[in-house]
Amino acid sequence: MGAVDEIVFHQLLHWHHFYDRASGAAGLVSDGLLHAATLSAVVAGLALLADLRRRRTFTPTRWWAAVLLGAGAFQLWDGVVDHKLLRVHQVRYGVDPTGYDVAWIAGAVVLLAAGALLMARARRRPVR
C-alpha cells in the first residue's frame, strides 16, 4: 500500500511528499526513502511467498488476507499517525482535507475488515 500511495499520490498526482515540512529537495529524498522501504517490503514478501510455495504450505486465501491486512494497517497508520498526529504530510493541499482524511481512513478500515474476514475463512480451512 505504501508503494501505491507513493506512486499515485506522490509521483503521478503530485499531491504531497512523504515529508512536506521542508524544501522540495527534502520531500523528494523522503519519497525516495519511502520507495526504498516499500520495495524492500515487496521483495521480503515475495521471498516469504517463495518459501511457502517451496514448503507446499501456500494458501491463496491466507496470503490475500495478509496482503489486505498489511495494506489496511499501513493506510490506517499513515492516515492517523502521519497525517494527523505527526503532520508530516496531508493527503492533499489547497483544499479542505476532511473528506480526503475520512476517505483515506475509511479505505483503511475496509481493507482491514476484508483482510480479517478472509483470514477467518482461511483459519476454518485446514492447511494443505
Image: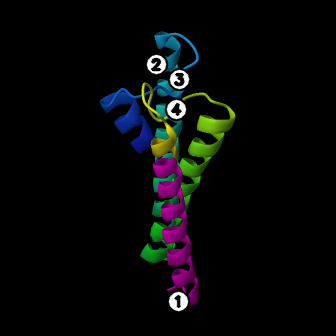
* Lateral position of residue 43 relative to residue 9, left or right: right
Closest to the observer, 36 or 11: 11
- CB under 8 Å between discs 3 and 1: no
- Residue 15: percent from left, percent from top: 40, 28
| Cα separation between marks 1 and 4 | 41 Å
Q: What element does badge 4 sit on?
A: loop
Query: Alpha-carbon neighbours of circle 4 within 10 Å: few (<14), some, or many (≥20)?
Result: many
Identify residue type, mark 1: Arg
Closest to the observer, 62 or 107: 107
User: The magenta stretch spans which residues?
Assistant: 102-128
> Mainly helix, strand or loop, the magenta region?
helix
Depth check, mark 1 against mark 4: the one in front is 4
Residue under label 2, please give it: 28
Residue under label 4, please give it: 90
- Residue 6: percent from left, percent from top: 43, 35
- Residue 73: percent from left, percent from top: 58, 54
Identify residue type, mark 2: Leu
Residue 30 badge: 3
